[in-house]
Amino acid sequence: MKEWLYQHLLQLNTTETMNQLEGFTRLGYSQDEVKAMQAFQNIAKSLNMTTERDEAGNIHAVWNPAGSDKSPLAFVSHLDTVTNGGGYDGLAGILCGLGVIKRLQDEKFKPVRPISIICFASEESDRFGVSTLGSKAVAGKIKNDLKESLASLIDKNGVSIREAVESTGLSWDHFDQAEKSKTSYHRVIELHIEQGTQIEVAGKEAAAVQAIACPVRLIVTIDGKSGHTGTTPMHNRQDALLAAAPIISFTSAKAIELADEAGVPLVATVSSIDCSPNAITVIPGRIELGIDIRSVDDTSKEKMAHAIRDELISVEQEFGVTTKVQELVNNPSVLLDTDVHQSLLESIEEAGYLSYSMNSGAGHDIMNMASKWPSGLIFIPCRDGVSHHPSEHASIEDLEKGVTIMTHYAKKEAGGSSLED
C-alpha cells in the first residue's frame, strides 16, 4: 500500500517528484486543476469505478460492485491548492479515499452499499476570495442572489468566476444544478491533514473533528489625511497608518483575553493591510485592514467583532481619523454529526491508533455537506503543522494510517463481506 500511495500521490499532483521549491499551484477552475482531476478520474477508472463530472465541475466516482440502489457512503475532498501551496492539503483526502477502494478490492471485500469519492472543485479561496465553490453547489448553497453576485468576482488577472468556470467546458447558468438531494448520500466523510500540531502535542495519532470554526471577516477602513512627510508638522497630522497600529495590537491582545474568559479557543488576526497612497514621501491617508476572527464559540466571535468596533471609536478620537467597518463574512460555526464523530473515534481505535477529539480552526468542504447529510472529518498529522506552503508534508505512513481508519469505517457503514466468505 505504501508504494501504491506514493505513486498515486505523484500522479494526482501531476508531477514526478514531491520536491518542489515553489510548491504546487492549482487554482480553482484552472487548467492545472482540471489536469489533476483528470488524473483522479483515470485512477478511479482503473479501480473499476464509474465517474461523472457535474455542472459545477466536481468529479463523482462510484464503486458499486453489488449493484445496490442504496445511497452511497461518500468520501470527499479537493485537488486545488493555494498559490505555491503544498501537495497534501485536500489531495490527501482524495488519495486516501482511493486507497480505501484499493484495499477493499485487495481484500476481496464486497460492500452492500456503494462507496463514492467526490473530488470538489475550487475549495480554496485563493483565486476569487470565496471558498468551497464545488461543495457549496452540491449542498445547494449557490442560488439566486448569491449566484448572481459570485458571477462577477474576478481574480488578480481580471478573470471572473463565470469566465473561469466556462473556460473548463461548463456553463455558469447551469452551475447550481449540481445540487444533490438529501437522499443522495448515506454518510459523508472528509479526511484532511491537520494543518496544526494538536494531535502530536496530545500524544495521539489521528483525530475526529467535533466542530469547524467558521469565520467572521471584517474590512476596517481608516481615513486620515495625506500630506508631505517633510513639511507637515507632527502635531498637525491625521496619519491613518499610525491610527491603524493600535488596532493591530489590540486585536491580538483582545483575542487572548476573550479566549481565556470563555474557556474556548478564539483567534483573531489582522492578516491584510492596504496602505494608500503607499509612497515614502506621503503621510498615509487611507488604510484598509482585513481582520479574520475564528472560534467554534459564535458568542466569542461576536464579542471580538464588537470590541474592535468600540476600539475604533477611541482611535477616531485620539488620531482625528474616521473609520468604517464592513462585515464580509459572518458564518455560524458548524457542529458535525455526533454519531458520526463517535463512530470515527471508534474506527481510529479499532484500526489500532490513539484517537483524539478536537475542533478545526480551518474551513473545509465538509462544513457545506454537513448542512444536508450526516458528516464527519478525520485529521491525520502533518509535519510541524505546516500547510499552504511548499514544505507541507504528510508521511506515507500517516497517509496509510488514514486509509486504514477509513477502511474500518467503510466496512461498518457500507456493510458487506469478503467474496471468499
Image: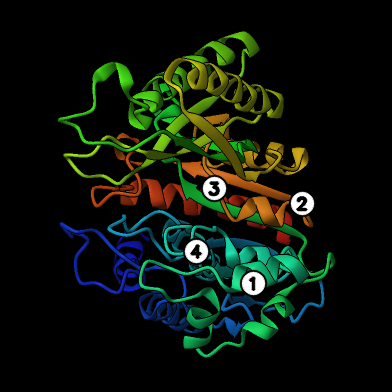
Query: Which numbered mark, 1 or 2, is in the foreground of this view?
Result: 2
Residue 63 in percent (x, y) is at: 62, 76
Residue position for label 3: 405
Mark 4 or mark 3, which is nearer the start of the sequence?
A: 4
Where does the C terminus fall, quadrant-wise? Answer: bottom right
Q: Say what amino acid the circle numbered 2 marks.
A: Pro
Q: Amino acid at mark 3?
A: Ile
Q: Nearer the viewer, residue 71 or 222?
A: 222
Q: Is residue 173 left or right of residue 57?
A: right
Image coords of residue 12 (percent x, y): 36, 71
Nearer the camera: disc 4 or disc 1: 4
Instruction: Please give the name of the residue rendered at 54% of the width and 83% of the height, measured from the top-left corner.
Output: 48
Using the image as rendered, state which of residue 408 and residue 323 is in the foreground.
323
Gap between marks 4 and 1 measured at Cα = 32 Å
> Which residue carries the number 1 mark?
419
Kind of element beneath mark 4: strand
Element type where label 2 sits in the image: loop
Asked if residue 213 is positioned above or below residue 140 in the image, the reply reads above
Residue corresponding to mark 4: 78
